[in-house]
Image (cartoon, rainbow, N blue to C red):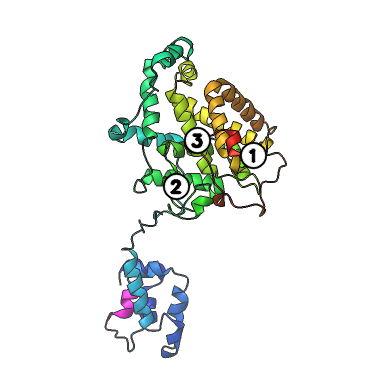
Amino acid sequence: MNEQSCSFGTESEFRDGQVESVSAGHSSLYPDNGALMAFRGIPISELKNHGFLQALTTETNGWQPGVVNPEVLRAQEEWEVVDTIHPDTESGVGSQQPGQLVSFSEALQHFQTVDLSSFKKRIQPTVRRTGLAALRHCLFGPPKLHQGLREERDLVLTIAQCGLDSQDPMHGRVLQTIYKKLTGSKFDCALHGDHWEDLGFQGANPATDLRGAGFLALLHLLYLVMDSKTLLMAQEIFRLSHHHIQQFPFCVMSVNITRIAIQALREECLSRECNRRQKVIPVVNSFYAATFLHLAQEWRTRQRTISDSGFVLKDLEVLAKKSPKRLLKTLDAYLARVSKGQASLLGAQKCSGSQGPHSKDLTFTGVCELQSHSLESAGLV
């Protein structure tokens, strides 16, 4: 026994006590229980670190135990294994519980530093027009994006080409952050599971719902929940998505709005505002939030249901591309009122209950899935 063990008692006390027992079950073999009382408040990890468990199971200073205590042996074996335990990487949850939230800027920086060259080859920065369409766009269309902003625009479109990679820790942190901010949970969850359907994905794997928007869809959700100005709006829209009648898949709806933002950027509908602010990413983020806000207001006030989703999104896309400045002004005014406690998206409307079918049992039609038939032929007026 070294001198460090004196912090738990004198060396003589330990020698007297080690024979006398660690478990109450063997107290009858040894008349003096002083050591047991002395060590009762000491964590077992400290006993291991100071060699006490080894002293109890091996010959020390001429002492030989008459009976080997199986409980002590088992405890020693368990502690020997502790240092070799590794986190379960297959479950998608890291060893740290809970994991740290990630900000939008941190996630964006990740994409700015990794090699995206293979994804960048796929992008088409602008919509190709020919004939009269090209002439009309040149004469009456929006201005072209400034040369110095095109690299930032290309980054946005490149991220939209990236899928969700469960092996990338940053991708996992983004998903975990979105989940925690929307649900209020303080604990990490598996990257696959039915709990993602509660957030409004259509299946247990969020990656399957990112078609047409890629990881940009998740970055937009991250922006919405991590920006203090839009968090309340995100939470209210999320509550609306769980309305007992007007429910809709929140995350899938968000992905469709990201698709609209991508198209608006490629068709140069946002170029005027980007040129004015001399930035692209903040403009695209604000446009996404403004479009989502307009959809939520339309959904609530006009009593829309999931069966209306395709046509609501189609009308929304037309409006957003035609009047992006109007949507952005509406967002600014709404957030200003929210900051003063003067605005609420939902008001007193009830947004929870057991009535009505669950959203995953209904058919959601997004921008890409909308059929070409008219409202009359679909039987929707």
Q: Which mark is residue 367?
A: 3
Residue at x 56%, y 20% (from the top left corner): 325
> Mark 1 = which residue?
304
Q: What is the tally of numbered marks visible in this picture?
A: 3
246 above or below 18? Answer: above
Residues drawn in magenta:
53-65
Asked whether residue 12 is in view, the answer is no
Is label 1 or label 2 in front?
A: 1
Where is the C terminus found, in terms of image quarters?
top right
Task: Please tell me whether mark 3 or mark 2 is closer to you in this view.
Answer: 3
For residue 206, the mark is 2
Q: Is residue 379 above or below residue 359?
A: above
**What amino acid is found at the position of numbered circle 2 in the picture?**
Pro
Q: Amino acid at mark 1?
A: Arg
Q: Is residue 312 left or right of residue 129?
A: right
Point 35% across, 71% down: residue: 78
**Is label 3 in contact with label 2 (beta carbons under 8 Å)?**
no
Residue beneath the point at 30% across and 72% down:
1
Give the residue type at disc 3.
Val
Nearer the observer, 107 or 358: 358
